[in-house]
Amino acid sequence: MSAPGPRADGPLAGLRVVEIASLAPGPFACMVLADLGAEVIRVDRVGDSAGLLAPSGVLDRGRQSIAVDLKAPEGREVVLRLAETADILVEGFRPGVAERMGIGPDDCAQRNPGLVYGRMTGWGQDGPLANAAGHDINYIGVAGALDLLGRAGQNPTPPVNLLGDFGGGGMLLVVGVLAALQERTRSGLGQVVDAAMVDGAALLTAFLHGMHAAGLWEGGRGENLLDGGGAYYDTYRCADGGYVAVGAVEPHFYAELLDRLGLAEADLPAQYDLDEAEKLRAVLAETFATRPRDEWAAIFADSDACVSPVLSAWQAHEHPHNRVRETFVEVGGITQPAPAPRFGRTPAPVPRPGSASGADTGAVLRGLGYSEEEVGRLRRAGSIA
């Protein structure tokens, strides 16, 4: 019997997620779940048509939207009835806020004991900072991740909001809720997933903690093997103002780098001698400055020297490799990253644009058993929009 062919509904088809609208990491997590085939219903707030949404219309892709007044008893009841039908609920309030609204974990578990309740915060649900305000830069600062980034002798460089919001936040929330769903297959019960950006950002530094323990990461910022301390692992400006990324860590890759550059290793400082790294860096910088970026990219295209062009986020979709891989797609007129990772038998569907705030309120409520009369009454009362 042959294996079933690919189905473009994604590996999470049949899963229902309720997303209480928030900013950045929660929406990113729910975007990933929607990308992989889950049905995601975003609960927006009545009267806030855009304030809690990413302005790009990318993080909200693949969602239905209902607009609810969470302060009204009827609005809370809508969320609880949604929770009855869901596998996962995601919220991003400060600790205690969802409980005060009447949609906390215990409230939802009374309706649906199998619900996985995902909580996305910066500091977590407990600890001295649990109720403090913060942003990505604060969470990764306390996690020990920010201090690793930047040039020697200079201030730490914020990595936009990739490490806290998305890598250590939203992506770890995805891992957490899916792990809780796996556990539910044994226990039949849901549980709370406390995803904190400070915890996730700290987790991302695990490799470097191992390097430090082994005596391989002893210098300050920008003075180590993989943070720009070594000239063989750095970026270099080209003749046209573009940059190339060089990652020739292994000796045989480094030898190929020098060969393509026309340099003799015997004339240069030793590759791993960090005390002489600036001398080697100066030679590499001078050499890369003689040609434009794309010319260097062509020279190294078929090599193992680990040299690649540094593309802007808005150029990356034009790279031949990304074109063949279809790493970027167009959704609603916006070029954006495609769903990842890839699945052989149940590939993720092409994302669709997210619904406007509240666009699906009537349809979702009717699916929960509300009558047309009840929907009309809730609209007139301002409990939904």
Image: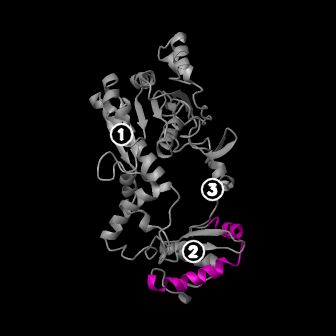
Location of residue 98 by image quarter = top left
In this rendering, the answer to whether 236 lies above or below 369 is below
| Distance from the alpha carbon under mark 3 to that under mark 1 | 31 Å
Residue occupied by mark 1:
179
Q: Is residue 342 left or right of residue 322?
A: left
Between residue 78 and residue 48, name the one nearer to us.
Answer: 48
- Disc sitting over residue 9 in the figure: none
- Mark 2 or mark 3: whose residue is earlier in sequence: 2
Quadrant position of the C terminus in the picture: top right
**In the image, residue 327 lies at what x, y percent?**
61, 48
| Distance from the alpha carbon under mark 2 to that under mark 3 | 28 Å
**Label 2 close to label 3 by CB (< 8 Å):** no
Amino acid type indicated by mark 1: Ala
**In the image, residue 101 lies at what x, y percent?**
38, 31
- Mark 3 or mark 1: whose residue is earlier in sequence: 1
Amino acid type indicated by mark 2: Glu
In this rendering, the answer to whether 26 lies above or below 299 is above
Residue occupied by mark 3:
313
**In the image, residue 106 lies at what x, y percent?**
30, 30
Q: Residue placed farthest to the front in the image?
A: 381
Pair 2/3: label in front? 3
- Disc sitting over residue 256 in the figure: 2
Q: Which residues are magenta?
A: 274-302
Is label 1 in a helix, a strand or a loop?
Answer: helix
Q: Residue placed farthest to the bottom in the image?
A: 267
Amino acid type indicated by mark 3: Ala
Pair 3/1: label in front? 3
Query: Does residue 181 appear anywhere in the picture?
Result: no
Between residue 361 and residue 116, name the one nearer to us.
Answer: 361
